[in-house]
């Protein structure tokens, strides 16, 4: 009898699972309501609105459904604080009525809020005002943290943006505003806020102990995104160059690498972009170098010029000049390079150079990369390629064998070894007939 009495209980559990009772632990999206009715519901219940704008074909959208929205902790938090809505932005022609009945609302929302990336998550206050948004797949913990932040006015993007310019903001708020603008692809806002902040604060940064790590990180970010004007770049260069001790104490490294990057980003890259668009075959490098040396420290300005020459001639597929400047870069600055950079540069020389003196000049630098990382199969392959191309076939085969022992299934290594055995080129044969291979 006791065993028999357990059967109805077991059947009830199974029945509940099939009926969906066990699936109510994740986010429960409201159904059957128009957008107007959703807004009214949020106001009545004094809750924010979370709107997931998705597309039927969107892979990350489906991942959000399967991996994030189904989590109990996510469901519990969102139920307590938000009216949650999903709205499909496209139409398939065979959508159920629950989706097709919202086509009109979806079109209006997509146009009003410029939805072009999926998934897009919009957060509205209790009165229906858009306070923030984010895009793309987020892990459960990240999604939960983002949603928690949406209840804090200081972390609501549009709330902060609306307040910008009305009163003085803390540095952290400015950094949040610029970073969030970049995340959302609003580069014009990011640029406007960033440059205004830099112009306002540059004089203060010239004082002692005025530069903190958040400020340095912010300036580096602005430089990376091309926000600095030439004048701002010169001022930042001067400050960081003068206060290098502070820079080291904050970042753990000298400012030289960043300052070279700054010169390239502000002075050289725009010049190259203009020249490439106009189809110019070459650039007046001496003129550009003279211009930069007048504004910056010559010791730091020379390297970005050579690096730019490597990029330019690689882009133009002018292999003789490409390898010439690559070797020059190694000879002048190879001592401080990482094994990865050394291998990348020497590998390019092994592929494209037709000059024995360049190949021989690259060999010690390839060997130096191996000294830093002796069990790196790619470094071994580069070293073997240089030896082989200079006629040292026996040594090359020995080195290539070591590379194959580290990565026995690697097709490229096998192919290179077979070519070396057969006496065939392992390098790229140039299209320029005037450049003869060895």
Image: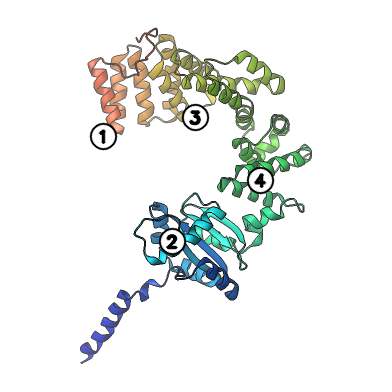
| Distance of label 3 from label 4 (alpha carbons) | 27 Å
- Which of discs 4 and 2 lies nearer the camera? The answer is 2
Q: Which residue does the numbered mark 1 point to in the structure image? A: 409
Dot 1 or dot 4, earlier in sequence: 4
Note whether 13 is above or below 338 in the view shown: below
Tag 2's secondary structure?
helix
Evaluate if marks 2 and 3 touch, with contact meaning CB atoms under 8 Å apart.
no
Cα separation, mark 2 vs mark 1, equals 38 Å
Q: Specify the quadrant that holds the C terminus.
A: top left
The residue singled out by tag 2 in the image is 68
In screen coordinates, is 378 left or right of 125? Answer: left
Residue drawn where x is 28% and y is 25% of the image: 401
Do residues under tags 4 and 2 come within 8 Å of each other at their CB atoms? no
Classify mark 1: helix, strand or loop: loop
Question: Alpha carbon of mark 4 to alpha carbon of mark 2: how far?
Answer: 32 Å
Say if mark 2 contacts mark 1, CB within 8 Å.
no
Q: Is residue 240 above or below residue 193?
A: above
């Amino acid at each position: 009898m006791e065993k028999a009495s357990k059967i109805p209980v077991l059947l009830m559990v199974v029945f509940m699972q099939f009926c969906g009772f066990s699936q109510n632990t994740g986010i429960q999206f409201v159904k059957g309501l128009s957008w107007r009715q959703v807004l009214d519901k949020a106001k009545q219940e004094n809750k924010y609105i979370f709107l997931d704008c998705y597309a039927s074909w969107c892979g990350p959208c489906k991942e959000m459904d399967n991996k994030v929205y189904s989590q109990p902790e996510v469901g519990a938090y969102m139920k307590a604080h938000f009216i949650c809505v999903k709205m499909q932005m496209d139409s398939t022609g065979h959508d159920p009525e629950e989706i097709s009945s919202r086509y009109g609302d979806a079109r209006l929302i997509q146009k009003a809020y410029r939805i072009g990336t999926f998934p897009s998550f919009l957060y509205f206050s209790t009165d229906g005002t858009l306070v923030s948004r984010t895009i793309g797949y987020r892990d459960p913990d990240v999604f939960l943290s983002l949603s928690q932040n949406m209840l804090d006015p200081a972390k609501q993007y549009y709330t902060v943006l609306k307040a910008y310019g009305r009163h003085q903001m803390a540095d952290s708020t400015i950094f949040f505003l610029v970073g969030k603008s970049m995340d959302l692809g609003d580069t014009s806002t990011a640029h406007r806020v960033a440059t205004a902040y830099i112009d306002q604060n540059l004089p203060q940064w010239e004082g002692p102990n005025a530069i903190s790590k958040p400020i340095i990180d912010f300036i580096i970010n602005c430089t990376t995104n091309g926000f600095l004007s030439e004048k701002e770049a010169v001022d930042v260069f001067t400050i960081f160059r003068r206060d290098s001790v502070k820079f080291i104490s904050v970042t753990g490294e000298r400012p030289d690498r960043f300052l070279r990057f700054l010169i390239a980003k502000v002075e050289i890259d725009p010049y190259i972009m203009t020249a490439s668009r106009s189809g110019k075959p070459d650039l007046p490098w001496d003129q550009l170098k003279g211009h930069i040396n007048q504004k910056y420290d010559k010791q730091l300005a020379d390297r970005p010029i050579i690096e730019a020459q490597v990029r330019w001639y690689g882009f133009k597929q002018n292999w003789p000049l490409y390898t010439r400047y690559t070797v020059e870069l190694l000879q002048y600055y190879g001592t401080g390079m990482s094994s990865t950079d050394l291998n990348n540069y020497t590998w390019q020389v092994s592929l494209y150079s037709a000059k024995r003196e360049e190949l021989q000049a690259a060999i010690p630098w390839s060997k130096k990369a191996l000294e830093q990382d002796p069990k790196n199969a790619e470094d071994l392959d580069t070293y073997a390629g240089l030896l082989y191309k200079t006629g040292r076939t026996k040594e090359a085969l020995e080195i290539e064998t070591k590379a194959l022992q580290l990565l026995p299934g690697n097709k490229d290594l096998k192919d290179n070894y077979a070519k070396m055995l057969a006496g065939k080129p392992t390098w790229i044969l140039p299209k320029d007939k005037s450049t003869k291979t060895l």
